[in-house]
Image (cartoon, grey):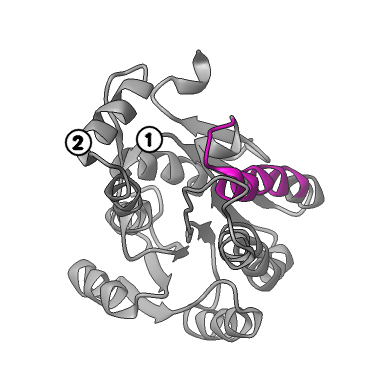
Amino acid sequence: MRLEGLKCVVTGGASGIGAATVRRFVKEGAQVCILDRNLPAAEALAKECGGAVYALALDVRDESAVQRIAEAVYARFGVVDVLVNNAGSELNKSYSETTLDEWNRVLDTDLKGPWLLCKHFVPVMVERGSGSVINIASLNGLVGFPLSTAYGSAKGGLVVFTRDMAIELATSGVRINCVCPGVIETPMMERWTDLMPDKEDAKSMLRGVMPIGRMGTAEEVAGAVLFFASEDSSLCQGSVLSVDGGFTAQ
């Protein structure tokens, strides 16, 4: 019960790493608000988790919507102790084939979105003098991959955004840290392998990329998010935690 009584917000919380994080937070005693574009899926997860969870629809790219949601969440919760910026959008295309709309979609979701959530949620945390923000970046934000210019640029920007905000917030009592998952079995990964000529060959290749010989699970990433959400990470500020089965250790 490391989060007992805490109020938490998880964007993109209806599936994948977000959903695993919601379930883990509830298990640890938190109340959670799921923010997701897919409201029916978010509401289904909230129903599964019981009275400790509720869901709201949000497109993190829309500042006016983010502002309205922040006001609604604070009106209901009173405080927000933990903010997890997990909502993301992927793209598997070369730089030359990427369209402007695709570039903007990925950058707006994966980088502008976390900034907007911080802009409208964090000032109240600062006023209270406590809180934890966890940004979900990616292995793609730490090392280069082919066909990843938009996604890698967004996630790499999110890593540096985390560090810059950590310095701004250093004496505020609000912590901001970053988790960089490696190859994880999630709906996003399924969508990526669906684009490959042979889905099973693609999955086999991904498992081979991981030194541990397998893909990670959303639940394993949620454990890292829990660490940053809890007081166990009280000395962490601007930390970037790779959860990648040893990939960046090579």
Residue 232's tag is none
Mark 1: few/some/many CA within 10 Å (<14, 14-19, 20+): many
| Residue in view at x 54 percent, y 38 percent | 140
- Residue at label 1? 183
Q: Position of residue 119 (x, y in %)?
A: 70, 69
- Residue at label 2? 200
Q: Position of residue 89 (x, y in %)?
A: 48, 59
Q: Main secondary structure of the magenta part?
A: helix
| Residue in view at x 76 percent, y 54 percent | 172
Examine the rendered structure and indicate whether residue 241 appears above or below residue 75.
Answer: above
Horizontal side of residue 5 vs 205, given as left or right = right
Mark 2: few/some/many CA within 10 Å (<14, 14-19, 20+): few
Find the magenta span and give its range: 144-164
Examine the rendered structure and indicate whether residue 66 appears above or below residue 159.
Answer: below
Q: Nearer the viewer, mark 1 or mark 2?
A: 2
- Residue in front for this viewpoint, 63 or 27: 63
Of the residues shown, which amino acid type is indicated by label 1?
Answer: Val
